[in-house]
Amino acid sequence: MNGGEQVVNVIGLGYIGLPTALMLASHGIEVTGTDCNEELVGTLKAGKTTFKEKGLEELFADAVKAGIRFTTEIETADTYIVSVQTPYDKFSKKVDPAAVVSAVRDVLKAAPEGATVVIEATISPGTIDRSVRPVPKEAGREDIRRVHAPERIIPGNMVYELLHNNRTIGADDRAVGERVKELYASFCEGEIVVTDIRTAEMTKVVENTFRAVNIAFANELAKICRHEGMDVYEIIRICNMHPRVNILQPGPGVGGHCISVDPWFLVGDYPSLAKVIDEAMKTNDGMPDFVLNRIHEIMKENGLTDVGRVGLYGLTYKENVDDMRESPPLQLLASQERHLAAPLLTYDPYITEDIVPNQVHDLDAFLDACDMVVVMVKHDEIRENAEKLRGKVVLDCHNILDLPGVYHI
Ligand code: SAJ
């Protein structure tokens, strides 16, 4: 039997919890998925997925066939996987572990003796010691085992990455860590490293911080090159031919719930030590405003005066997903609103509901209404429709279009 015959309850069925629950179930593990959001549970029970992701529908069908159940209740299980949200306080930049703590409290009411609680949610280093460890202690449940197994999957390629990425399991007790490793090994073909909890917490945040700092470096280079009238993409391309250089790409900002958030945990906890990280995060956070300035400059250069005929192509935080968390286009629109300016037109093939004012739901109608188009996201659809942009003033924030006269950040 795989997974050591463990019965699993996954708590929090969002971007991470849902695919994880489905993956376990479709690999022969008995799984219940729990979420406090009744509407979300209702949708899953009705046989529908709650967000778009490559391969998710098929995985969902397999898991349903294998008998996965969805409920708003926490159930009796050997292992609980907690994948609830961990927002950070925008002012103090510290992680807010309230949802994790509350989930662990609820788990204690249903957990049999010796059950294991695996925290998958991203937390700042030390959160388990500070906020999670005291919960079973205060409840007189020191039999409960704690594990941190931070997720590593990337939206847009989650199903593949769940199967193939290496993973980290942090546990107080090696044997417990090995048992959780066995559970994840039921589907994970990558290497699974067992370490202690604090190390696992730190590695997760460091991985995302590494990427954030690298993107900030690329964004800073873009600004330097703009000042010098040089092509940042060509410079990065040539630099990356060096065997030990790997610079990421500049862009209109950093979105998502990870790279734009996790590094702030280190700044919040170590404000006098995390200097490079602090500056990098400020650089990335400043990019939507930088793009707004570029729009203004380019409008002036082309004699365009009507903001109502400038459109943002793409609203999501990254390409080919429907996820808008911390999305740079939304940050840009918020900044524009703060300047009391009329909102720009917007269009995104992945966003069918009305999210912002002046949103157009048809590409041709959007392009007809625009004199200037700003490419905010690297959706494949934009590359495929490149010809339709010919003749317009275009600011391509991702360097994906091969058209004459295109502007860059
Ligand atoms: N971005 C750039 N330039 C680049 C790459 C990305 O500006 O060269 C921007 C993207 O447009 C996007 C943001 O950064 O707005 C983040 O996108 P991403 O694709 O780099 O990463 P996420 O946030 O979708 O997922 C990350 C991944 N972490 C790492 O690659 C270290 C993923 O593996 C993690 O599981 C995820 O964070 C998480 O949940 O922590």
Image (tube, grey):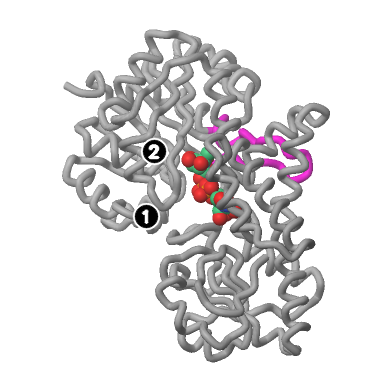
Identify the mark at residue 53; answer none if there is no mark.
1
Toward the viewer: 266 or 382?
A: 382
Toward the viewer: 160 or 257?
A: 160
Toward the viewer: 362 or 32?
A: 362
Residue 204 visible, this angle: yes
Q: Quadrant of the C terminus?
A: bottom right
Measured as percent of width and height from the top left, residue 206 is found at: 60, 31
Report which quarter residue 185 is drawn in. top left
Measured as percent of width and height from the top left, residue 221 is found at: 71, 52
Residue where numbered disc 2 is placed: 73
Q: Main secondary structure of the magenta part?
A: loop
Label 1: state its secondary structure: loop
Residue 356 visible, this angle: no
Q: Quadrant of the N terminus?
A: top left
Q: Residues within 10 Å of mark 2 (few under 14, many from 20)?
A: some
Question: Compared to 374, does 34 lie above or below?
Answer: above
> Could you tell me which residue is drawn at 79 percent across and 27 percent down?
273
Q: Magenta residues, as a range? A: 85-102
Residue 111 on the magenta segment: no
